[in-house]
Image (tube, rainbow, N blue to C red):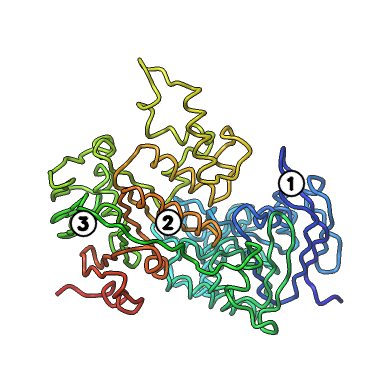
Amino acid sequence: MSNNILEMRSITKSFPGVKALEDVSLNVRRGEIHAICGENGAGKSTLMKVLSGVYPHGSYDGEIVFEDKAAEFGSINDSEHLGIVIIHQELALVPYLSVAENIFLGNEQRARSGLVDWNATNAEASKLLARVGLVENPTTPVSQLGVGKQQLIEIAKALSKRVKLLILDEPTAALNDTDSEHLLDLLRHLKGQGITSIMISHKLNEIIEIADSTTIIRDGKTIETLDMQADGVTQNRIIKGMVGRDLESRFPERTPDIGEEVLRIEDWNVWHPTQMDRAVVTGANLAVRRGEVVGIAGLMGAGRTELAMSVFGRSYGRNITGRVFKRGEEIKVRTVSEAIGHGLAYATEDRKRYGLNLIEDIRRNVSAASLGKLSRRGWVNANEELKIAEEYRQSLNIKAPTVLSVVGKLSGGNQQKVVLSKWIYTDADVLILDEPTRGIDVGAKYEIYTIINALVAVGKSVIVISSELPELLGICDRIYTLAFGRITGVVPVAEATQERLMELMTKEKD
């Protein structure tokens, strides 16, 4: 018997106008945690969709060998039947069904009568939840649980299918540090039970921490596979393989040229939209100046996004009070249109749900927030719309054949550039960027940082909300900390450390 549980040999997969994978090979040893790294659009997810049967046999060239036998999957059901289960970055749970119903959806526990045996379903679900370390009533609707717990439910669902090879696509992208560490511990535990895992991740520190082997894919080709223990692999070593060169610095250099105050928020208060007695932002005061990058740091649930969305046209919350000043004069931001009219822009953390129209092309997404600039007497100038979109495609290096490419088919990094293009085209004076680099690779992150630097270089003001403290320390001039809905401090970046920021981010109410 081979030591490899999986061999993918010379996999080539093409789509109209693009070769996504070219002669890619992957060997995964039994019982290991095998990481796959690469820039957005490198072909990582495509390779896993080939493996799991999302792209069926016959739609690609090459060979898959699983447990020493040739495998030809016509659908995802075929791969699951052999014990290969994939958990996608966008979780596939049904929010209105219970935890138990989600775990056994399509794999129901049936009584002899053929009906669902709910006692057996809930009992087996409880056992599976215990295996993933989740103490939750199996009858609880999934919609009532946070994303960290939902990720564990997906793994419990995989265990119910007697998984042998578990594939996780960006499993910690939307998790906080505590939930991420819990998930990594679970993967170690499953490894101890003989379950093999393949993990796609842009979080290189996690890969260093947990992976036994790492395969690097670049431009649809296998570059190398690293033995993480024997080779003493560092993050810089992985980055070099991913981008084809050394990155001397993760953050582009910038010499700040900070001017007068542009935006000031005073005594800002926001109440939860449905929980009547819960204040999510209390007495917040914040200011940003021309040419300045201001960061907002806070733990999950601290109120960072709620603060940003409520300022941007009150698109979140109720009973909102406080004052907003633009260059010293009070302005009204009661609607999104008013906020845009006053030169504010907000790039959401959830680009796929709120930031983009995924079934539309780049052209229409870029122009969506600024149709007034392109229209006359109610008609949009289509030629000008194409011209503007093409300018942003080139200047922001959006990797797509044309501006008529559908946004939903772009990689995460390129989708983020389309979001930025949309708001830059509004000619906003203040851009609020909520988790602008979440789920994208180090190369694309560097490009986003370069775009931010270019914006402040021409006098724009940028507010960056990020869960990654090294990112805030690398790109900001000042950093505000938020805890329990309150601003707990503001630190010049020259005086800031991760430890100091974390101290302020966990500060209890005085």
State which quarter of the image contains the N terminus.
Answer: bottom right
Q: Taking 243 as reference, is 413 left or right? A: left
Please tell me which residue lies in front, 165 or 238. Answer: 238
- Residue 317, above or below 178: above
Label 2 crowding class (10 Å Cα cut-off): few <14, some 14-19, many 20+?
A: some
Which mark's residue is nearer the viewer, 1 or 3?
3
Question: Which numbered disc, 1 or 3, marks the residue that appears first in the sequence?
Answer: 1
Question: Which numbered disc, 2 or 1, marks the residue that appears first in the sequence?
Answer: 1
The amino acid pointed to by label 2 is Pro
Label 3 crowding class (10 Å Cα cut-off): few <14, some 14-19, many 20+?
A: some
The amino acid pointed to by label 1 is Lys
Q: In which quarter of the image is residue 313?
A: top left
- Which x, y percent locates residue 400? 61, 41
* Callout 3: SS: strand
- Which x, y percent locates residue 368? 42, 33
Residue appearing at x 63%, y 76% in the figure = 211
- Which x, y percent locates residue 36? 65, 65
Q: Taking 178 as reference, is 117 left or right? A: right
Please tell me which residue lies in front, 9 or 151. Answer: 9
To which residue does mark 1 refer? 19
To which residue does mark 2 refer? 141
- Which x, y percent locates residue 190? 62, 76
* Callout 1: SS: strand
To which residue does mark 3 refer? 287
